[in-house]
């Protein structure tokens, strides 16, 4: 069988090498665990466009909780359904959605979607970036190499055929979505979007986080991406960091209220 170099936040659990982390991030903000109901607000936000980009092994439907909370407060929210065939294809799909926005936009990426927004975020309409348990690569940094920098506890990626990868459905709940109900996680496992193995060698050319403000969300119990890797990337990008203790990799589903709140901060420039 062809040896796969697995990785983490593509949704890919990684083989890892020892890495020395930078000093701890001081900008971290603790998020509490109290979920708030959606409140309808008729005021139009200053930056009212939000574009959401999903990660590997998932599709855009997982953003519904975030979508509902933001639209209830007057935001115009669009969800990208990128094909996960290559980074270039996924960036192109994201740019098409950005082009449909009528003004300044907050661009949000989960997991591998972070790599997508790092490149697509150079669009002049994009005002700020939000990384949700996401990759934030530097220029010329292959995604597979980035994902090996800091250890992750799981390694359950397997070939899906024709050069694509998938997450073992039997391990999906524990690895990817431990804080979701089992039936919901099982449905996600059986409907997961396979990702091209070639993406592990793809690179961005111009990281948008070098010129635009960014925000990073770290789920404390992420078993797919190392929270330490996420913190390290966000510190490198000078992102404002929010910690969500106890959350799995799908923090945007299990803690949609907290993710929506960070997006609101990005829209307001807070």
Image (tube, grey):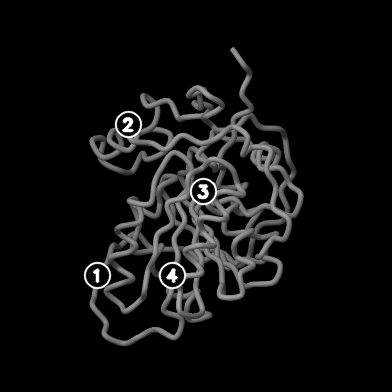
| Between discs 2 and 1, the one toward the N terminus | 1
Residues at marks 4 and 2 touching, judged by CB atoms closer than 8 Å: no
Which of the two residues, 47 or 33, is positioned nearer the viewer here? 47
Q: Mark 1 points at which residue?
A: 38
The image position of residue 99, as x and y in percent, is 51, 69
Which of the two residues, 111 or 22, is positioned nearer the viewer here? 111
Task: Kindly state the secondary structure of the residue where label 3 is placed.
Answer: loop
For marks 4 and 3, give the CA distance. 17 Å
Residue at 59 percent of width and 35 percent of height: 7
Q: Mark 2 points at which residue?
A: 190
The picture quadrant where one finds residue 186 is top left
Near mark 3 (Cα within 10 A), the count class, few <14, some 14-19 or many ≥20, is many
| Between discs 4 and 2, the one toward the N terminus | 4
| 175 displayed left or right of 86 | left
Residues at marks 4 and 3 touching, judged by CB atoms closer than 8 Å: no
Which of the two residues, 205 or 185, is positioned nearer the viewer here? 205
Judge depth for marks 2 and 1 and give the one in front: 2
């Amino acid at each position: 069988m062809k040896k796969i170099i697995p990785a983490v936040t593509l949704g890919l659990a990684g083989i890892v090498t020892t890495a020395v982390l930078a000093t701890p991030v001081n900008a971290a903000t603790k998020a509490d665990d109290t979920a708030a109901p959606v409140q309808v607000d008729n005021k139009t936000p200053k930056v009212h466009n939000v574009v959401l980009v999903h990660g590997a092994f998932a599709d855009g439907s997982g953003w519904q909780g975030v979508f509902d909370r933001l639209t209830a407060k007057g935001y115009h929210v669009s969800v990208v359904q990128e094909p996960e065939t290559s980074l270039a294809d996924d960036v192109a799909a994201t740019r098409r959605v950005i082009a449909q926005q009528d003004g300044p936009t907050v661009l949000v990426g989960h997991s591998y979607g972070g790599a997508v927004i790092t490149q697509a975020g150079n669009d002049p309409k994009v005002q700020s970036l939000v990384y949700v348990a996401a990759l934030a690569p530097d220029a010329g940094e292959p995604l597979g190499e980035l994902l090996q920098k800091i250890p992750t506890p799981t390694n359950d990626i397997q070939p899906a055929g024709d050069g694509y990868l998938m997450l073992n459905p039997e391990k999906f709940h524990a690895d990817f979505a431990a804080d979701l109900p089992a039936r919901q996680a099982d449905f996600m496992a059986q409907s997961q979007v396979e990702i091209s193995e070639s993406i592990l060698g793809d690179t961005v050319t111009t990281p948008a986080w070098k010129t635009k403000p960014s925000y990073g969300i770290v789920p404390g119990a992420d078993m797919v991406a190392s929270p330490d890797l996420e913190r390290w990337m966000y510190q490198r990008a000078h992102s404002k960091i929010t910690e969500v203790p106890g959350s799995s990799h799908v923090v945007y589903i299990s803690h949609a209220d907290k993710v929506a709140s960070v997006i609101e901060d990005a829209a307001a420039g807070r």
